[in-house]
Image (cartoon, coloured by chain):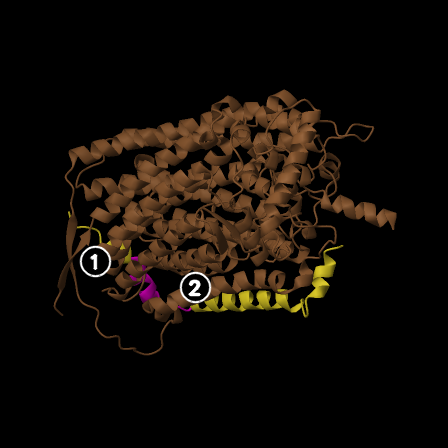
Chain colours: A yellow, B brown
Amino acid sequence: MKFINYLQGITGVSIYPMISLLLFVTFFSVVMVMVIRADSGFIDHMKNVPLDNEPKD
Amino acid sequence: MELEKFSYDNRMPRNFAMATVFWGIVGMLVGVIAAFQLAFPALNLDLAATTFGRLRPVHTNAVIFAFVGNGMFTAIYYSLPRLLKTKMYSDLLSKIHFWGWQLIIVAAAVTLMAGFTVSKEYAELEWPIDIAITIIWVIFGINMFGTILTRRERHMYVAIWFFIGSWAAIAMLHIVNSIEIPVTLFKSYPVYAGVQDALVQWWYGHNAVAFFLTTPYLGLMYYFVPKAANRPIYSYRLSIVHFWSLIFIYIWAGPHHLLYTALPQWAQSLGTAFSIMLILPSWGGMLNGLFTLRGAWDKVREEPILKFFVVGLTCYGMSTFEGPMMSLKSVNAISHYSDWTIAHVHIGALGWNGFMTFGMLYWLFPRIYKTQLFSKKLASTHFWIGTLGIILYAVPMYWAAFRSYFMFRAFTPEGQLQYQFIDVVQSTVPFYVMRAVGGTVYLLGVILMLYNLIKTVQQGSFVESEEAEAAPLPKFKATGKQFWHSVIERKPIWFLVASLLVVAIGGMIEMIPTFMIKSNIPTIATVKPYTPLELQGRDIYVREGCYTCHSQMIRPFRYEVMRYGEYSKAGEFIYDHPFQWGSKRTGPDLARIGGKYPDSWHFNHMLNPRSMSPGSIMPNYPWLFKRDLDISNTNSKIHAMRMLGVPYEQGYEAKANDDLQKQADKIAASLKNDKIEISSKKEIIAMIAYLQRMGKDIKASETTSTNN
């Protein structure tokens, strides 16, 4: 038996890879756009969170 | 606003750090012993507990869950309170977490050496320990989220997202992969069989690498690299993209462990596509770490901690490039079942996990003991020895992999296979020796570190807790439009839900089709359930960890079909709880071993493999000839199998042991024909029964079809 038979056995199997690809592309694009538009003051603040805690010697 | 006083506890990070060093040395030592066993089979000592098949899971579990696990907890218990300006939520939960985890490790080592195993790689532990892991993981989660919810810093730093994502994903992976039916106190059968079991296992196996060995250590990297370099991370924006794309893509890539197997083609392709995509977020993360050191490379020259981080990150980059390449089918044809995979995981384990851990420990100990590192020079020596160890380990393995590939696929002009399997084994042994030496060198470096850290501890005085103060978190008032990610960074529970959703979607789309549709696994009429004796023999096969060296999956290549027989079909494994496809061929594939040799051959071979196959590196199994087979549990095994859908007739439990005895007597009689006297009650009889059954069912179907 060839593997193609399993594929054909699933109703609407062609939708699976499409859904997954769409989900990923949408998600990734949204993250990219939002990250680029993020407020740089906030970004700078977050960057320095670990360093602000340096124990004072 | 009034400042609140609180303190950071240093005892927990210290305890976890010490456990990291201790288990690191234990795990690596077991690895070195196992490596030498492959070159010198006498080192298996002819004892059940010390054979390679049992030590190898001890090594992998110790390094992953004991060394890296404790390393991860060290990083979390040190960085989390400081990043959130609060103390850990509960000292009691911290203590339960610490001691519970160490107890699990001890229990794991003891049970694995005793032969209690599910045989699913990196998830070998039996069901009582699985439950204990779940409980401790939940306690750790409560402690972590309790801390996050009582924070004084509104937004969660990127390291914390990685910790949250890891926690959620590991919880899901562990539970889904460990669903099993207990048969006795220390024996269980996974509910999945064959192809489904393989798919779930490698979805787990791959993502255990992702969410146990990678994401928590990226959290570690995002905290300790900026700390050690004393400069902020290169790009916080990149870290956001890094996090979401990494956890989104990683979860899909599991099927790349099953290329060319009986797994449906579409699932294999999906795994490959997402594996290639993984290069981008992985390298984004590596570059983010390395670029943090831009303009500070002069520091790297003098500071061994930064040297460890730089090489650790470079190894991360190397293995995350190598991994996707190995998931290309043409490359996978060479790398799968070979020592290439072993080299690949050790670039990750020794280079990435090892060196990141060492860097963190060298940074941490002087701070919590309020002193300087005892010897920077010694740490630098450790760095060079460690690097040398990695090279000595990896290069022979790569070499061995390609060498054996070319030998396996060599044909004579007459169209016969040019080399026997044993020829390939013998030519690989020198590389096994070199690899073991490489591992020893690396371990020596770790012992240097132990000495250095002990000296550091002795010259310093422990700071149990550090006083700190911060303003309490005022109620949040939104002002104007907000960056969406800053919103989600404020809401840890939403963050947890979002990351869990992202990993769950990937897991579901990957697995649902294989599970829901029965026709996914075509049944082969002649494939029958195992007889009671074969079932018992199979459990011995599992107990002795045969899967660590032998695959049961013939790929559709000319040189494999000629060497091992007809390639494996999905329908052949429907009664295999658990599947035994294996992931490494140190010995030949066994999928069609049944009927290839007489019973007496197996008898002599199991007693002393070298008597039948000169130059073999397989251990002797003398205890199988002394121990009586435990048939008291046959009934419950048959019962459990029927519950899982194996079609034993109703009431077969009562007759099972009679059938078992009849088959055993037959094998004993066949041995007697070859002048071998042995009681039919010994374990070896069951083992022979199983070995002689393997892969035979489908041959029956061929005969019937030609007869028709």
Q: Position of residue B574 (x, y in %)?
A: 64, 53
The answer to which of B115 and B388 lies nearer the viewer is: B115
Give the labeled residue for mark 2: B499
Q: Which mark is residue B57?
A: none
Bounds of the magenta segment: A35-48
Looking at the rendered structure, the kind of residue marked 1 is Lys
Left or right position of B164 against B639: left
Q: Position of residue B57 (x, y in %)?
A: 47, 39
Residue drawn at point x = 49 percent, y = 30 percent: B51
Q: Position of residue B196 (x, y in %)?
A: 60, 55
Quarter residue B439 falls in? top left
For mark 1, name the chain: B
Quarter residue B401 falls in? top right
Left or right position of B231 against B577: left
Tally the numbered discs.
Answer: 2
Report if residue B255 is visible in the image.
no
Looking at the rendered structure, the kind of residue marked 2 is Ser
Give the labeled residue for mark 1: B87
Question: What's the distance in space between the residues labelled 1 and 2, CA to CA?
Answer: 25 Å
The answer to which of B648 and B16 lies nearer the viewer is: B648
- Secondary element at image label 1: loop
